[in-house]
Image (cartoon, helix red, strand yellow):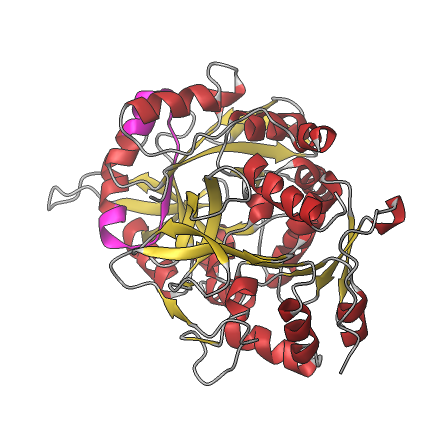
Amino acid sequence: MSMCTHHALNVPHQETDRRIQIVDTGVANIASLHAMFRRLGYRSNLVDRPVEIERAERLVLPGVGSFGAAMQRLQELDLVACLRERIEAERATFAVCLGLQLLCRASEESPGISGLSVVPHIVERFSNNVQVPQLGWNDVEFKDDRLIENGHAYFANSFRLKHQPDGWQVAVTDYDGEFVSAMWRGNVLACQFHPELSGAWGERLVSHWLTGTGHA
Amino acid sequence: MLKKRIIPCLDIRGGRVVKGIKFQNLRDAGDPVEQARRYDADGADELVILDVSATHEERLATLSTIEAVREHLTIPLTVGGGVRSLVDAKRLLDSGADKVSVNSAAVERPELIKELAQQFGAQCTVVAIDAARCLENAADKTSWQVVSHSGTRRHQLDAISWACTAESFGAGEILLTSWDRDGTGTGYDLGLLSQLTSQISLPVIASGGAKSIAHMFEAFNHGAHAVLAASIFHDGHMDVLTVKRELSAMGIPVRIDHVNQTSQSYLTGA
């Protein structure tokens, strides 16, 4: 149906390929993401057209702000179908913070708004038993499989995915009970935390994703 | 479990780190980029940069300082000082700040907090409150009033109720500085801290007066979610990792990872 069938996973990389495309979700403050990729030896730029999403070898879906505003923006830019297709094809995609939530079917934050629906669950708000938002460093523990060693990551979130989606490997964090702090399948990685603000550990995780996509 | 945070603070002016007592008698205390990198490598959980510039030229220098710090920093960066509008905040965020701290301008126009939270999110909106102890009043109850403009202005505004207003306007964090203790090394104002943390549910960063690990320990036991410290780290008395190891031994949950591994070392190993 579209051009989202391009699997360039184990192709030897060239220096000119060390690029990252970051979806311009509009509200995101992403100077820190750009800086992290530069430290890792990559150049990153913003993209907002379907053809760019389809062509990108490595794509980052960042997100700050509300679920509804971000989905509305993706719809306006006509990016919903190609993002969904890309992720379902397990092409190299890295979803950060709200980006993870956007992979879900919906969120309590924005009732009535559909997400990318790659996983069928609904994102829920933390209960009032804990301080909301969760703001600060928390433990990240890999479940069955691990990408790197367990570590600490920096979180700033009021909503979270509680259910481990079928077919995905996950890492979990305990805040108001366990929630999915990272999940991956093929070359798709999604993190509820901010790896770009999570010190050496965060960089190592991203570096691992880059290696896994055949380009580190 | 959410960790208690240790946050070094750099006061900068004209691209250099400065330090004084109660914001007076500023003296040069080094290169911000170098210090930021050292704190990061030592395991600091965040970094706060307060711009104490006096001139337009010095403020412009701040933006390039933030860009230079961001290039290396792998932890969250909060920048405050002279933020009066959304435009000011955006400029700082574009330069590489992750959070923006507002103080005097929010006291004058509290709606600024709402605007920032709406535009950039609560997680990005830090309200800095400088509080000074009032003389004991008739009811023999201690209270604190808000001071602003680097301490030159005292407001008829109760610091605790101001924090409640900030919370209801959408602030994500409170950076609470004790005007009486700042730069004195006599410890955080624990009375102020426990009063304030019992009244609001936002994370509170305690600031002003720390000189020892014991002071930080006390602050955490009086409700602080994070502690800010400047001179304790600047003058090389103590490094962040040592502080965190000792706090951890005292039972405070802190983040201790493999430190001193820069991104470069992973790349060469990859």
Where's residue B41, x and y in %? Answer: 57, 27
Q: Can residue A46 be seen in this view?
A: yes
> Could you say where residue A14 lies in the image, as x and y percent from the top left?
88, 46
Answer whether residue B210 is magenta in the image. Answer: yes
Q: Does residue B77 appear in the picture of this structure? A: no
Q: Which residue is drawn at 36% across and 44% down?
A: B2
Residue at 56% across / 33% down in the picture? Answer: B11
Which residue corresponds to the image point at 69% horizontal and 49% vertical from the top-left?
B95
Residue occupying the point 84% across, 47% down: A13
Instruction: Pinpoint residue A37: horizontal percent, then vertical percent.
Output: 71, 46
Q: Residue furthest top?
A: B237
Image: B257 above or below A121: above
Where on the picture, by quarter, is residue B36? top right
Q: Which quadrant of the figure has residue B187? A: top left
Front residue of B75 and A165: A165
The quarter in which the N terminus of chain B is drawn is top left
From the viewer's side, name the closer residue of A143 and B267.
Answer: A143
Q: In this view, does A73 lie above or below B37?
A: below
- Say left or right for A58 vs B154: right
Residue projecting furthest to the bottom: A112
- Magenta-highlighted residues: B196-217
Q: Residue B127: where, in percent of width, then height?
A: 44, 52
Looking at the picture, tell me which residue is in the foreground, B76 or B166.
Answer: B76
Number of numbered discs overlaid on the protein picture: 0
- Residue A53, above or below B147: below
